Amino acid sequence: MRLSAEEIRALREALDGLPIERAFLFGSRTDDARRGGDIDVLLYSRAPSFPLAHEASSRFARALEAKLDVLVVDPDSPTEEQQAFLRTLQLVPLDDVLRVRAAA
């Protein structure tokens, strides 16, 4: 997983206090052999997806002046399209990473 300490701090700030059940990293940042790439996160939440994604990405941009791509999925009712897309992803849980890095 390719996230700097500064990016992890910004993710903590972006996601802190939001109604999120689980958070995952996906995309190129899950592959240590790749370079560059934006940060893509999947958030499982029952909250309305657009306001939640907007709040998380706005907070991240304020903390780091960088872009965060956010996908929000309701854990109780993912659409067929979301389910198909999720099956293609390599997901790295962020829950423990954010807590461990925060405590360090």
Image (tube, rainbow, N blue to C red):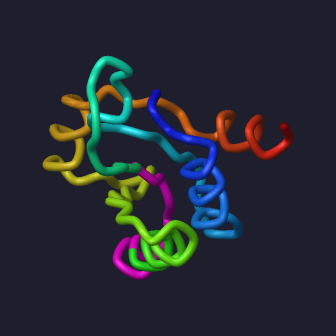
Residue found 40% across the figure and 49% down from its top: 42
In-front residue for pair 28/20: 28
Report the side of 45 relative to 81 (left or right): right
Residue farthest top in this picture: 33
State whether residue 65 is above or below residue 30. below
Report the side of 89 relative to 54 (left or right): left
Quarter of the image for residue 31 reads: top left
x and y, in percent, of residue 104 in the image: 84, 37
In-front residue for pair 65/100: 65
Q: Is residue 52 magenta?
A: yes
x and y, in percent, of residue 87 in the image: 23, 30
State whether residue 15 is above or below residue 101. below
In-front residue for pair 24/75: 24
Residue found 53% across the figure and 33% down from its top: 93
Report the side of 81 relative to 19 (left or right): left
Quarter of the image for residue 65 reads: bottom left
x and y, in percent, of residue 89 in the image: 26, 31
Number of numbered tags placed on the structure image: 0
**Region of the chain picked out in magenta, as a range:** 42-53
Residue farthest right in this picture: 103
Q: Is residue 67 magenta?
A: no
Residue found 42% across the figure and 81% down from its top: 51
x and y, in percent, of residue 55 in the image: 48, 78
Report the side of 66 relative to 82 (left or right): right
Residue found 36% across the figure and 35% down from its top: 29
